[in-house]
Amino acid sequence: MGAFLDKPKTEKYNSHGEGNGLRYGLSSMQGWRVEMEDAHTAVVGLPAPGLADWSFFAVYDGHAGSRVANYCSKHLLEHIISASLGTTGTQGLQGSHSGSDSSTVDHPASAPPSVEAVKTGIRTGFLRIDEHMRSFSDLRNGMDRSGSTAVGVLLSPDHLFFINCGDSRAVLYRNSHVCFSTLDHKPCNPREKERIQNAGGSVMIQRVNGSLAVSRALGDYDYKCVDGKGPTEQLVSPEPEVFEIVRAPEQDQFLILACDGIWDVMSNEELCEFVKSRLEVSDDLERVCNEVVDTCLHKGSRDNMSVVVVCLPSAPKVSEEAVRKDAELNKYLESRVEEMLSRSGEEGAPDLVTVMRNLSADTIPNLPPGGGLASKRSVIEAVYNRLNPHREEDGNGTELEDPW
């Protein structure tokens, strides 16, 4: 549920990197929430023998606090590696903390784990870190009741391992269509509802016991204390679903991982088509990710927003025609705003909401698919502010009209 600010915090955290035949960019924004509870992991070249050509990306959507999300962003991968390799320790995850990427690490040659060992190791890693965090005093004594979803992709040279626990989501864009999506873990899903009821709980207003909106998560220990039930049989389970897909280098274009603050306002197809259109305009992945979070904010998302875009070798390339059409679109929007402001009479200039409403009634060609007019809000707002610098503001410097 959570509380909201009077005005969204639109500052972004960005990062990018490349290696192992891929490039990635990420963006996160606090938005309307009173606290930033998202976290992420981006590691190119896993720090373990034989895994230098593997990579790992994940997004964590915290709730009731950021403690669990932040800890998992730093340490989940080492638990997965440890379980997958059948060892009790790793050589440390340098740079795998939230908001950073590690440089590729070279290790002595070693046989990589089998597909089944990886899948088992991922599940085991989740259960281990969940049990480990339970021992933290603030989580054990109830001073901190936070939890977090986790969605990730582990890339080997031959396979993509999609990992999901909760309602964040990852998708694969292959051959110019959405080829795969993880499945959200919601209390109303029949399988999830059955487990919740078997543990003595209920599903009310689509929430576990009328409170928690996800049926699987890390942390959330208030929902994991049913006697006689194992860790995967509790009201909320820390067990991820793991999906393995054989890579198709000539067809695989990009991956997207995002929290529900993104998916709440864009479908799988809309987001993928929007990202594809932006990749044809710019090869700056931070810029592409920033456009995603800005567009979702303008589409009405009230949640924290985090997105990671991972471009594979067959990703869309910048197109001169797409760049030209995008520039023409921006020029058209600027001229329309100028026209509306120039026609303002004694009543003064129209506010930004009215400008957007008028533009939405136009038939505008070449708007980005999936993003629509909302994806050009920043362009429209920039020219509006330039042409109307003396708009009324309140004592806090906030526009009287609500621009959002």
Image (tube, rainbow, N blue to C red):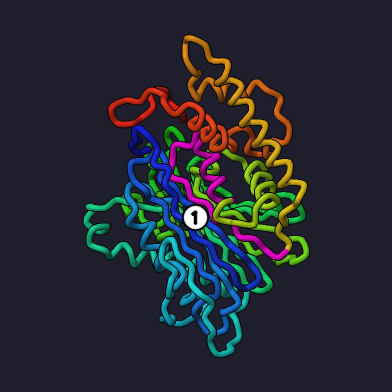
Residue closer to the observer: 348 or 134: 348
Of 4 and 384, nearer the camera is: 384
Give SS at disc 1.
strand
Q: Position of residue 224 (x, y in %)?
A: 35, 54
Is residue 267 or residue 97 the one in the foreground? Answer: 97
Residue, x 72% and y 36% (percent of image)?
366
Which residue lies at the image location 41% right of the left edge and 62% below the top edge? 98
27 part of magenta stretch: no
Q: Amino acid at mark 1?
A: Cys
Image position of 185 with respect to 107: above or below? above
- Which quadrant of the view contains residue 92? bottom left
Left or right, 17 with reference to 367:
left
Measured along the vertical axis of the image, is residue 90 above or below residue 5? below
Q: Residue reaching furthest top?
A: 346
Q: Is residue 70 above or below residue 88?
A: above
Residue 13, position in %: x, y?
A: 44, 54
**Residue positioned 68% across, 41% down in the render:** 327
Q: Residue at x 41, y 81 (%)?
A: 89
User: Which residues fall within the magenta stretch?
Assistant: 288-313
Image quadrant where residue 248 sits: bottom right
The answer to whether residue 209 is seen in the rendering is no
Residue neighbourhood size for the residue with mark 1, other residues' Cα within 10 Å, grouped as few (<14), some (14–19), many (≥20): many
Q: Which residue is mark 1?
A: 165
Q: Quadrant of the N terminus?
A: top left
Q: Is residue 157 above or below residue 69?
A: below
Q: Residue 61 at x, y = what percent?
A: 44, 51
Residue 260 appears anywhere in the view: yes
**How many numbered discs?**
1
Magenta-span inclusion, residue 308: yes
Residue 375 point in image, percent of width and height: 59, 38
